[in-house]
Image (cartoon, helix red, strand yellow):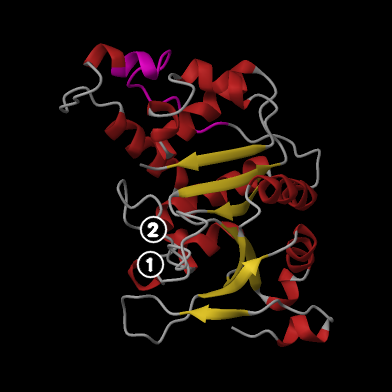
Amino acid sequence: MNFDPLLRRGISLPPGRKITPSEGDGALQPLWLSNSPVSADLFAQLRTEHAASGLWPLLLDSVDPNDVDFRPWGCGELSPERMSSPGAHDAEELLARWWKDYTATDEEDDVLTAEERLAVTAPFGQSWPGIAPGRAVGTDPDAMAEQYARVFLADRPHARLGLVSAFRGADALTAVGWEGPVNYDNDTATFSAVVRSWEDRFGARVVGVGYSTLHLSVAAPPSAPEEALAIAAEHFAFCPDNIWQGAHHDLIAYAEYLIDLNCWEFWWD
């Protein structure tokens, strides 16, 4: 991890340290973590300099802001060596497979009956509707990311800065060895592949990451119910807990919530 390009441009990093994963051979240090909270202005500067530095900035949240280990980041609960490559996976194939798994009605469920499970994904039921078409990006995605970063930090003033060697935000999730969705798939590269697709189709950008949360800015959100419903189906396949355990308990309600929403936030149980 080389900081020289940032120094040459007059960008001074706050005190921080390189993080070694708690598992593995100890040779990798996939993350630089600030010791304290950071400003949205510094985050914006680092995004601007990404092409020169090769370091992708992330705003990192913790399980408990008062936790001295700042889990999972500060104590190295990261597994970069275990991950495959995002480029090895097809986003549409992944979403279709996950949809099939999460809409199955032959699995035991202590919470929902088969009929209730199908009602959650109505009007599609078990039928995967296919990937949503991309939308024209009218707002600059990077400007939107910087705007959302200010909202994110206002809600989470304890968030710290992370720097990861990665070409794009989606890939940074895999490169750092983030394990947030591990209860659903222990290869983060599969989730990175889908986020790559959202970056391309909707101007999404990775802004914040928590222990089991992911926060994206979105420059081209859906503006009509039909568009939103198709994207809601993708969100369900990507992170079913957003609907199963969220405030919007079926696709139709969740789709209404997504209309003109410039941030997508995910949480895995």
Whether residue 147 appears in magenta in the rendering, the answer is no
Residue most extreme to the right: 10
- The quadrant of the picture occupied by the C terminus is top left
- Residue 94 screen position, x and y as percent: 39, 44
Identify whether 134 is placed above or below 77. Answer: above
Identify whether 28 is placed above or below 192. Answer: below
**Magenta-highlighted stretch: main secondary structure?**
loop
Q: Secondary structure at mark 1?
A: loop
Which sits in the foreground, 65 or 178? 65
Q: Quadrant of residue 16?
A: bottom right
> What residue appears at the point 15 percent right and 27 percent down from the top-left corner?
108
Magenta residues, as a range?
117-132
Identify which amino acid the numbered label 1 is placed on. Glu
User: Is residue 168 visible to us here?
Assistant: no
The circle on residue 77 is 1
Q: Secondary structure at mark 2?
A: loop
Residue 156 falls left or right of residue 95: right
**Measured Cα–Cα span from mark 1 to mark 2:** 8 Å
| Residues marked 1 and 2 touching at CB (< 8 Å) | yes
